[in-house]
């Protein structure tokens, strides 16, 4: 199987998107509410970016193992404008209740995760990166679902009971 490193820019876009939803408020708290257990606080911009870029590192290392070559990008401050752009997009979309557009980004995140899963062949690195990306996906899923479909909590059904 042929693998490649997904552009770091794509990971930064996802990190910015997640950070925007984390910054948005719902009932006076973070709308996304992604808790940083290590530091006993909500994730902030820096920790979200670092976490998502850990998945990038997993992709890079896996490809390096496969091809014995380094394809990584190193600058820690790279793509800050791109990060802020996607943070503002998701914050604005959530704040204006534009869930149809948020869902398009959500579907894009699913496609990205599928690509990551395919391109990261090393099982340990794949599992580590997938855990991070799937947690982000779950948080976004929950946010969109709770914003649109109150009343399903603790049930498994296709209809909301009256």
Image: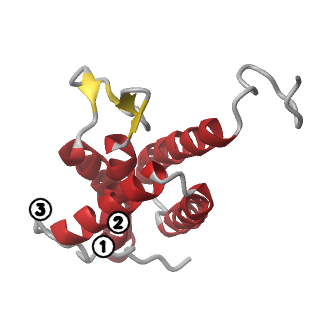
Task: Residue 140 in the image: state x and y as whole percent.
Answer: 52, 46
| Mark identifier at residue 76 | 3
Query: Which residue lies at the image location 19% right of the left edge and 73% below the top edge?
Result: 73
Point out the frontmost of discs 2 and 3: 2
Q: Quadrant of residue 5?
A: bottom left
Question: Is label 3 in a helix, a strand or a loop?
Answer: loop
Q: CA distance from mark 1 to mark 2?
A: 6 Å
Task: Residue 37 in the image: state x and y as whole percent.
Answer: 31, 23
CB contact under 8 Å: marks 1 and 2: yes
CB contact under 8 Å: marks 2 and 3: no
Q: Residues within 10 Å of mark 3 (few under 14, many from 20)?
A: few
Query: Which residue lies at the image location 54% right of the left edge and 59% below the top edge?
Result: 102
| Mark identifier at residue 13 | 2
Query: Which residue lies at the image location 69% right of the left edge and 31% below the top edge?
Result: 150
Of labels 2 and 3, earlier in sequence is 2
Question: Mark 1 = which residue?
Answer: 9
Question: Is label 2 in a helix, a strand or a loop?
Answer: helix
């Amino acid at each position: 199987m042929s693998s490649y490193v997904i552009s770091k820019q794509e990971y930064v876009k996802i990190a910015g998107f997640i950070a925007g939803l984390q910054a948005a408020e719902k009932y006076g708290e973070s709308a996304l509410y992604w808790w940083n257990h290590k530091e006993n606080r909500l994730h902030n911009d820096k920790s979200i970016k670092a976490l998502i870029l850990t998945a990038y590192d997993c992709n890079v290392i896996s490809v390096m193992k496969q091809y014995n070559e380094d394809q990584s990008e190193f600058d820690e401050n790279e793509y800050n404008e791109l990060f802020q752009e996607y943070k503002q997009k998701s914050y604005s979309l959530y704040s204006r209740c534009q869930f149809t557009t948020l869902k398009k980004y959500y579907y894009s995140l699913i496609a990205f995760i599928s690509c990551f899963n395919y391109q990261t062949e090393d099982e340990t690195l794949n599992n580590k990166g997938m855990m991070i990306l799937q947690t982000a996906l779950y948080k976004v899923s929950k946010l969109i679902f709770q914003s649109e479909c109150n009343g399903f909590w603790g049930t498994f059904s296709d209809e909301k009971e009256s």
